[in-house]
């Protein structure tokens, strides 16, 4: 059996038929071709597949795709505005916050969820926001610095 | 930030270093932050098939029978692959450089030797179909006794793990069951030493746990070749290994890789490519073989466990006069890279210290555990953990500052190493001096003036003790009869400075910060407890 899935994916209305019980990760990658979403453990433990559903960070590998039907889904593919990078993306570059890059999409989305909710986070807020995202390369410090820097720059720009 | 100290390394290089100390952006960073870097699994193919492997639930068992009839009829199943289908079903990774015997099957046929060993592969139209078909395979086993401890595996009558190595030790050059290092006479030196310190160190296996698991996709080309998209860290090594196992010329394989979601040594073992290629060959379709996280943890080879015994002969003035090392590397059931790790380990003994009598025996041992492989400095990392713990314990035992103890024994230019090479370009003393300065760790004047360029190739120079100073703290094991002191480790407590407060953005280390008032033994209590020797 196939189940219809309709999403607002990065602002675009999209629809597909997915296998019964398909998870959001597979539907995003295989049905909608959004390969910016990465799978790391497929069991909800590493945070690599984090996307925003209705603005909230969700582990797409353990999220039933049909439960998101009618909702908005944001991935790294929608972060960029044309040629311009999102402040988080620039900050990750400036702070050397990506090494192998595989956890980066999930980290960016977890960080975006934080900054959307709280534009002036403390270090503790940042650590709390990415505490479900495993990075095996960087040791986390450059990532924390990048998110704090993006928050500072975002705050200055809107001021 | 890195810095090049030209005052220390004046005669090392005369060029201006353009990169050291300056940040350089990765060339692939833009792809990483936009999610567009293409890892192996980001390539899409029509009619992709999925390969899943049935793994041994036993650490050691004989396979009595395999019944895959129901699985082969299951929905979506295109092909079942057994050991007999693998063209060359016995390989060892380093056979490409003629090191070691072929000992590991791609798919086990008669015996399984570790939990997680591959036995049979199902190729199906979806991962789910493959997984469900695996549930239908029936295998009956005769359980065999297993051995999990390196020293147990070497005892007479121990269970033989791997038929290529019946003594459970790797064969070096067809005649040696371990690697040896002999320099001077350790037993004579122990007899004359003021103190002998013997300790045991054990390092557990460590899984690399890359966020991207091992995997590959093999795609048949129209020209009879196969293009393989892979997570490997060792593209050409994996290509040649896959060619050997599939008995095909390597020019029929085109490997595409380079963008790897974390490796750390865990993606050099060519775990998935040979079967993916074989499956693509047998089905004529593109095949993906991707490890689940559970498989990555269970079957993905870890850093090997190592057991290390170190026995040091120490003099009261701080000199190490003898070091005897006995170590066992747990290779698991088969040889991946532990045999080579042992060679690296022996080359690293006795650490960066000039010790006139050194003796080492290091074994690569087979047990019924997951085969071990490379991980970040493997062969040296665990040894350094053991050696540097031993150095701290040695310093405590004789009541000397641990940094000064290291500096006193450090290699200097002109020293003869245990491997009969003359030490040159030494800088451990200078590095220790800079580290001490940055950490505001108090060093005595003679250690601040010490140099790797002086005193090499001969007995250690006199370090004059300051006899006017107070005796060592109570509990320091120093014989009252020890008159000729070359090193004043009896630093007075009056010298104490309050510890500098750490910079605010640096987390404080666990335990007490370095403190002048507890100089010597007590500041290491977080590591050693209150133990005294």
Image (tube, helix red, strand yellow):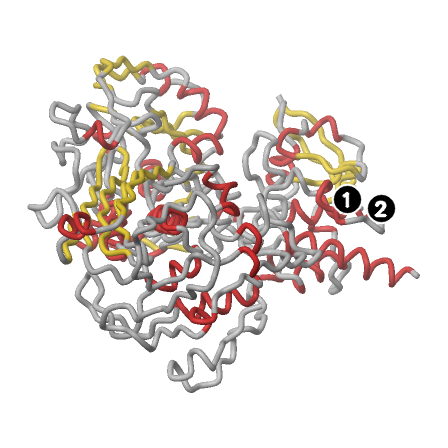
Determine whether, in the image, residue B420 is placed left or right of residue B125: left
Q: Quadrant of residue A117?
A: top right
Chain containing mark 1: A
Circles 2 and 1 in contact, beta carbons < 8 Å:
yes
* Residue beneath the point at 45% across and 68% down: B431
Report which residue position mark 2 lands on.
Answer: A118
Q: Position of residue B194 (x, y in %)?
A: 26, 50
Q: Nearer the viewer, mark 2 or mark 1?
A: 1
Q: Nearer the viewer, residue B471 or B434?
A: B471
Mark 1, Cα crowd under 10 Å, few <14 / some 14-19 / many 20+, is some
Q: Nearer the viewer, residue B180 or B208?
A: B180
State the residue in front, B411 or B375: B411
Q: For the residue labelled by badge 2, is the local secondary structure a helix, a strand or a loop?
A: loop
Please name whichever residue, B28 or B478, is drawn nearer the observer in this view of the structure: B478
Q: Is residue B405 above or below residue B93?
A: below
Mark 2 residue crowding within 10 angstroms, few (<14) / some (14–19) / many (20+)? few
Which residue is situated farthest in the right direction here? A159
* 2 or 1: tag closer to the N-terminus: 2
Mark count: 2
- The residue at 41%/25% (across/down) is B77
Q: Quadrant of the rendered structure where residue B8 is?
A: bottom left
Looking at the image, residue B76 sits to the left or right of residue B99; the answer is right
Q: Is residue B448 left or right of residue B242?
A: right
Seen at 71% across and 60% down, the residue is: A91
Give left or right: position of A137 versus B159. Answer: right
Q: Position of residue B371 (x, y in %)?
A: 30, 36
Q: Disc 2: which chain?
A: A
Q: Identify the mark at residue A125; answer none if there is no mark.
A: 1
Residue at 57 percent across and 39 percent down: it is A39
Q: Looking at the image, can residue B281 be seen?
A: no
Instruction: Say if residue B487 shows up in the picture.
Output: yes
Q: Looking at the picture, do discs 2 and 1 lie on one chain? A: yes
């Amino acid at each position: 059996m196939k189940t219809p899935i309709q999403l607002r994916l990065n602002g675009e209305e999209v629809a597909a038929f997915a296998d019964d019980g398909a998870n959001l990760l597979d539907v995003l990658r295989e049905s909608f071709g959004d390969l910016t979403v990465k799978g790391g453990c497929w069991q909800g433990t590493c945070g690599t597949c984090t996307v925003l559903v209705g603005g909230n960070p969700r582990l797409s590998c353990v999220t039933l795709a049909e439960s998101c039907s009618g909702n908005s889904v944001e991935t790294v593919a929608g972060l960029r505005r044309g040629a311009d990078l999102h402040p988080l993306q620039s900050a990750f570059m400036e702070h050397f916050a990506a090494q192998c890059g595989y956890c980066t999409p999930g980290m960016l989305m977890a960080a975006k969820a934080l900054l959307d909710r709280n534009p002036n986070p403390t270090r503790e807020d940042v650590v709390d926001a990415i505490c479900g995202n495993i990075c095996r390369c960087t040791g986390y410090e450059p990532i924390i610095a990048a998110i704090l820097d993006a928050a500072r720059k975002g705050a200055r720009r809107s001021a | 930030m890195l810095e090049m100290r030209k005052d220390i390394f004046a005669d090392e290089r005369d060029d201006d270093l353009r990169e050291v100390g300056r940040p350089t952006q990765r060339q692939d960073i833009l792809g990483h932050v936009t999610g567009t870097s293409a890892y192996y699994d980001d390539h899409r193919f029509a009619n992709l098939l999925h390969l899943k492997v049935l793994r041994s639930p036993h650490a050691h068992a004989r396979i009595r029978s395999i019944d895959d009839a129901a699985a082969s009829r299951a929905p979506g199943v295109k092909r079942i692959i057994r050991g007999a289908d693998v063209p060359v079903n016995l390989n060892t990774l380093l056979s490409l450089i003629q090191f070691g015997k072929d000992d590991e099957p791609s798919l086990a046929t008669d015996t399984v030797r570790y939990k997680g060993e591959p036995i049979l592969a199902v190729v199906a139209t979806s991962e789910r179909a493959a997984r469900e078909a695996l549930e239908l395979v029936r295998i009956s086993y005769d359980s065999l006794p297993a051995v999990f401890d390196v020293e147990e595996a070497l005892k007479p009558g121990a269970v033989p793990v791997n038929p290529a190595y019946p003594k459970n030790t790797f064969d070096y050059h067809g005649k040696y069951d371990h690697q040896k290092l002999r320099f001077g006479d350790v037993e004579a030196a122990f007899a004359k030493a003021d103190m002998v310190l013997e300790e045991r160190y054990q390092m557990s296996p460590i899984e690399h746990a890359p966020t991207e698991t091992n995997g590959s996709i093999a795609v048949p080309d129209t020209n009879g070749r196969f293009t393989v998209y892979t997570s490997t860290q060792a593209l050409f090594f994996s290509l040649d290994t896959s060619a050997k196992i599939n008995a095909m010329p390597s020019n029929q394989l085109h490997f595409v890789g380079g963008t790897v979601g974390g490796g750390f040594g865990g993606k050099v073992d060519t775990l998935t490519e040979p079967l993916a290629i074989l499956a693509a060959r047998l089905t004529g379709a593109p095949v993906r073989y991707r490890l689940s996280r559970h498989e990555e943890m269970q079957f993905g080879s870890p850093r090997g466990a190592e057991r290390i015994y170190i026995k040091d002969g120490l003099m009261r003035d701080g000199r190490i006069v003898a070091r005897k090392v006995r170590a066992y590397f747990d290779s698991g059931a088969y040889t991946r890279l532990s045999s080579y790790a042992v060679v690296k380990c022996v080359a690293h003994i006795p650490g960066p210290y000039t010790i006139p009598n050194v003796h080492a025996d290091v074994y690569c041992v087979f047990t019924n555990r997951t085969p071990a492989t490379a991980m970040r400095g493997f062969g040296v990392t665990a040894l350094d953990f053991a050696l540097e713990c031993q150095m701290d314990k040695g310093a405590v035992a004789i009541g000397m500052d641990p940094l000064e103890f290291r500096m006193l024994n450090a290699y200097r230019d002109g020293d003869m190493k245990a491997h009969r090479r003359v030490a040159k370009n030494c800088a451990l003393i200078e590095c220790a001096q800079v580290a001490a300065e940055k950490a505001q760790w108090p060093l005595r004047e003679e250690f601040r003036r010490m140099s790797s360029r002086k005193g090499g190739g001969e007995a250690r120079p006199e370090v004059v003790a300051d006899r006017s100073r107070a005796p060592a703290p109570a509990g320091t094991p120093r014989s009252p009869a020890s008159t000729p002191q070359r090193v004043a480790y009896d630093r007075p407590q009056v010298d104490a400075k309050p510890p500098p407060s750490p910079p605010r953005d640096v987390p404080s280390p666990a335990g007490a910060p370095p403190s002048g008032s507890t100089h010597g033994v007590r500041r290491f209590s977080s590591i050693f407890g209150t133990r005294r020797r």
